[in-house]
Amino acid sequence: MEELYTLEKEVGRGSYGVVFEGHIAKTGQKVAIKRLPCKDPECIELYLQELWAMRATAKNHVNVIALHSCLLQTGRRSLKPLRRGKLPLDLVESVLKGSIVQARGSQSIIQRRTSSVSRLRDRTNTLPSNLSTPQKPLNRAKKRPTQNTDEQTGPLHCSALWLVMEYCDGGDLNQYILSRPPDTYKNHSVMQQLSSAVAFLHNLGIIHRDLKPDNVLVSVTPNGPIFKVADFGLSKMSEGLADGNPIRKHFSSTCGSDFYMAPEVWGGLNYTAQADIFSLGVMFWAVLERITFLEEGTTQEQLGAYVCKGRWLMPLGEALWENADLQLCIPVKRNKLDPPGSAVCGLLLDMLAANPDSRPTADQLESRVLSALKEDSR
């Protein structure tokens, strides 16, 4: 690795890691750098899933966030590149064993590669070396002594993954849409671009499982905004075919965000890639009509559709799980100057069907979005 990355400032923080704005020192190119601390086997598994999914997408679709490189943190400030097609064996072993495993032979590797080790030059006030992540008691491997004076504070193993990704200057979909006046053209562009991205992912056998406005980033260009699917921490890759089709692969773990989860996920049933289609349907409806809610304990508006139950808001997926015959009313804002047309409304109802088999597949969705928008424009 010849590039040196400079951290400028923290731009995001979640349950599993921190994202910084940074630059490639040699070129000045702005990048997003995500630090994922490897302290819990369960978290490490999510990190490896994200890395694997982002490598699979490479830089082949404009509406999927691009991964430039991955670095392994082997010391307090020492980094080395992870070669393409390779995974850190100590992290894979940690996941399989359920406890943190120290890399074998890491000391000699670091010593041989001293001249090519990359270092992050930090311009932030502090570079957090111990980020808070959900943890459970671990049966940690015994620490081995090292003679490397730069690493006296702990064993030589991968303490964090750093993902270097393209930088999006428009924030996430919530920030971009809600900070601007209503724009029908941009709303339609959201539908076209995201349906194309999900079709691309599903054709690769990648199920995102956490599609929501927070996980869609926006790159502002002279030709208009480019919307990019990001954050693959909960994604799964289909390793085989089911009935000859990779998107029919079934998953069982309940994950996602409440207001975008499909009914079958809410119900704890096995589910397929069609759960992503439901999540997109919630997002599309919310974007088209600017339907928002306040997340509990915050004052930040979020895009999302729901059902009103008295004074409470119930996520669509939960409401449809309780009553599969629930009739959704699209649009809901009768006084809108430019409500969704009948073709788009019909498409949204199909995407939000309680029965996943009644929803269009991602390939069908991409073509149906185009035809529905065309039909309603006549």
Image (cartoon, rainbow, N blue to C red):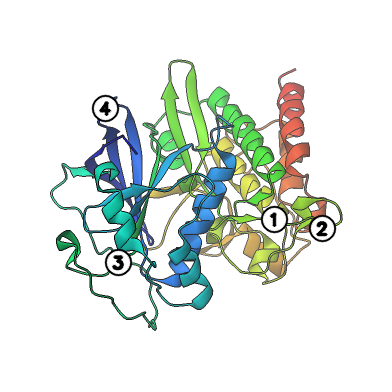
Whole-Å distance between the Cαs marked 3 and 2? 38 Å
Q: Residue furthest right?
A: 243
Q: Residue at x 43, y 29 (%)?
A: 219
Q: Nearer the viewer, mark 3 or mark 1?
A: 1
Vertical placement of 361 versus 155: above or below? above
Left/right of residue 148 with respect to residue 340 in the rendered view: left
Residue 218: where, in percent of width, then height?
Answer: 45, 33
Amino acid type of the residue tagged 3 in the rendering: Ser
Q: Quadrant of the N terminus?
A: top left
Residue 182: where, in percent of width, then height?
Answer: 49, 29
Whole-Å distance between the Cαs marked 2 and 4? 47 Å
Mark 1 lies on residue: 238
Vertical placement of 378 versus 153: above or below? above
Query: Tag 4 or tag 3, which sits nearer the N-term?
Result: 4
Query: Tag 4 or tag 2, which sits nearer the N-term?
Result: 4
Mark 4 lies on residue: 26
Q: Is residue 125 visible?
A: yes
Question: In front here: 202 or 192?
Answer: 202
Amino acid type of the residue tagged 4 in the rendering: Lys
Amino acid type of the residue tagged 1 in the rendering: Ser
Please tell me the numbered disc located at residue 242: 2
**Secondary-structure class at tag 3:** loop
Q: Are marks 3 and 2 in contact (CB under 8 Å)?
A: no
How many neighbours does mark 4 have within 10 angstroms: few (below 14), some (14-19), or many (20 or more)?
few
**Secondary-structure class at tag 2:** loop
Q: Residue at x 48, y 36 (%)?
A: 66
Question: In front here: 196 or 307?
Answer: 196
Whole-Å distance between the Cαs marked 1 and 4? 38 Å
Mark 3 lies on residue: 132
